[in-house]
Image (spheres, rainbow, N blue to C red):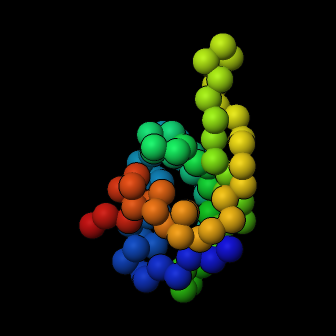
Amino acid sequence: MYLSLNAGQCARLVAYCEHSEDCERISQNELILDLYGLSRPMTLDLVIETNGVRVDGAFFLGYDEEMDGYFLTDPVENPADVLRALQEAGALDA
């Protein structure tokens, strides 16, 4: 899936990821971002491109109290859900 973000939004997303403990840079342009603090937690595999962000993977996360950890639940199939999650996390804010 693809998120059509402008250059400013892409820059803010990269800056957010660089300062997040829950983000891992896989390569120059690829980031794995876990958004645990959302109403519905999500993990994202993001590839920053010239005209936006390609989402190579997106899953909702569930939490297992007994194991004290998160696990993948359902795939996220709607780009609007990913955009909403990034907005809720503050990853696109100025």
- Side of 79 where 12 appears, left or right: left
Image vertical order of residue 79 relative to residue 4, above or below: above
In the visual, does 6 lie left or right of 45? Answer: left
Residue 87 is situated, as x and y percent measured from the top left of the image, at 40, 61
Quarter that holds the N terminus: bottom right
- Residue reaching furthest left? 94
Q: Nearer the viewer, residue 21 or 92?
A: 92
Q: Is residue 23 left or right of residue 45?
A: left
Work out whether 76 lies above or below 22. below
From this viewpoint, is residue 30 visible? Answer: no
Residue drawn at x 51%, y 39% as measured from the top left: 36
> How many labels were placed on the picture?
0
Would you say residue 7 is visible in this rendering? yes
Q: Residue furthest top?
A: 66
Query: Percent position (x, y) of residue 25?
Result: 61, 53
Question: Residue at position x 54%, y 43% from top?
Answer: 41
Quadrant containing the C terminus is bottom left
Report x, y in % for residue 54.
64, 73
**Residue 37 appears in which quarter of the rendering?**
top left
- Does 59 appear above or below 48? above
From the viewer's side, name the closer residue of 31 and 71: 71
Q: Quarter-wise, where is residue 16 in the image? A: bottom left
Residue 4: horizontal and vertical position, in percent? 52, 82
Identified at 72% across, 49% down, the residue is: 74
Query: In the rendered image of this protein, does residue 13 appear above or below residue 33?
Result: below
